[in-house]
Amino acid sequence: MADIREYKKMKEQKSNVVSGKSRFNVQPLPPSAQKGKNAPDDTEYDDTFDDEDYSRQLKLHRIRSVIAGIAVLALAALGVVYIISNVDNHTYSGYTIVNSVTRDDVQNVKYYEFADGYVKCSNDGIIYYDYKGNAIWNQTYEMKSPQLVTCKECLAVGDINGSTIYVFNTKGMLGSIDTSLSISQIDVGGTGLVAAVLEDTSSNYINMYEPSGEKVYSVKTTLSGDGYPLNISISEDMTKLIASYVYVSGESIKTNVVFYNFSDVGQNETERVVGGFNHYDSTIVPEVDFLSDTCAIAIGEDVLSIYKIKEFPNLQKEIKLDGNIERVFTSSRYIGILMENKESGDNFKLMVYDNSGNKVSETAFNTSYDTIKFDNDSIILYNDNTFTLMNIKGKQLANLRFDLPVEEILSAGSRGSYMVVNSTYVQEIRLK
């Protein structure tokens, strides 16, 4: 009992300390609020301790939040990789016809992918359709040998060996061009400017035109000096052009690859030439192409050259190819080369490189395809009755046969959706 009385006495003394007159002139705490208040009047040490504890807890909270955020991002990234991997490796065994339009055109008609639809081009005119077969615009003309080129949402149609070029975008015709001289090749940029190779009796011209027909630049080349221009390609921003010339040197036929710049960079250069490469010796280089504004390629009979160009070109990588090149196709990211296969029983070998020259895949097969092309990260291969779809790594995703002879297969905006042009219909299909 003595211990209990002593405890009560001590408790009453402590309560009196708490209930004494406050130095801040506040009312004494009620008994219910006094329970457990054993700290001395001078609370300076406790305040400092609370601030430090709060700061430490805040830092720990922030660290935990950062770690949690990183974990969420990592999981999201893994999820994206998983989804992309599944999509990239998804296989198909058949297809569904989503929409079908009966063809009413004549022979000598070709179909091309363009923007959010496709175009039908003939000697008599051109029509732009959406994927459902609805005509967006059409233009009539008369051409003996139309060549069509596209860049993003612009396209041009030129009459090879004639002198007329028509320029369009997704809304309709931008203008027409009369070159006066005979056209041997055309190319178009992202804003609708057109480059044309023109032929004269003893010389050639590489002219650039506004869609209105106004001549912007003209580069004259001579057969005796520069050689004959085999192929040209212009960058999307229309400031750079690459050309492949074949010329005679003694008893040998050689190739010269030349770069032109039509911006301020080339203004002080002779004929706007900012670089030339003549190391190909007797190798003919029949194809050149701009993959992007800063990357161009040259394809020879047995060589792939990759050039990087901001203002002046440099040869980034050169790949020697063993065998005869059957076909070359490109996109902004990849280069595809089909060759005879000398290494196994399969007839053909398809090699894919990225735009830095790194080999992405190599695939062998026996089927002879009429058309091979990239569709984003897919490869489309087809002939008149067989359609094959591969991913960029060479894995076969689909191998289908059609009842009617196929003339063209066009991308319809995403993997698995295509426009199939056969002898009777233009059909939108979806793989399944």
Image (cartoon, rainbow, N blue to C red):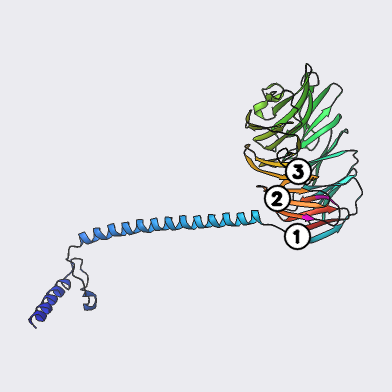
What residue lies at 24% left-to-right and 58% top-to-bottom?
Answer: 48
Distance Cα–Cα, label 3 vs label 2: 28 Å
User: Label 3, on which residue?
Assistant: 154
Residue at 88% x, 38% y: name it: 145
Q: Position of residue 328 (x, y in %)?
A: 74, 38
Looking at the rendered structure, the secondary structure element under dot 1 is loop
Camera-near label (3 vs 2) is 2
* Residue 275, placed above or below residue 345: above
Answer whether residue 248 is magenta in the image.
no
The amino acid type found where label 1 is placed reads: Gly
According to the image, label 2 marks what residue? Answer: 390
Residue 269, percent from left and from top: 67, 22
Compared with 164, 170 (above or below) is: below
Identify the magenta region.
Answer: 400-408
Query: Is residue 116 in view?
Result: no
Q: Which mark is residue 94?
A: 1
Discs 2, 1 touching: Cβ within 8 Å: no
Front residue (pair 327, 61): 327
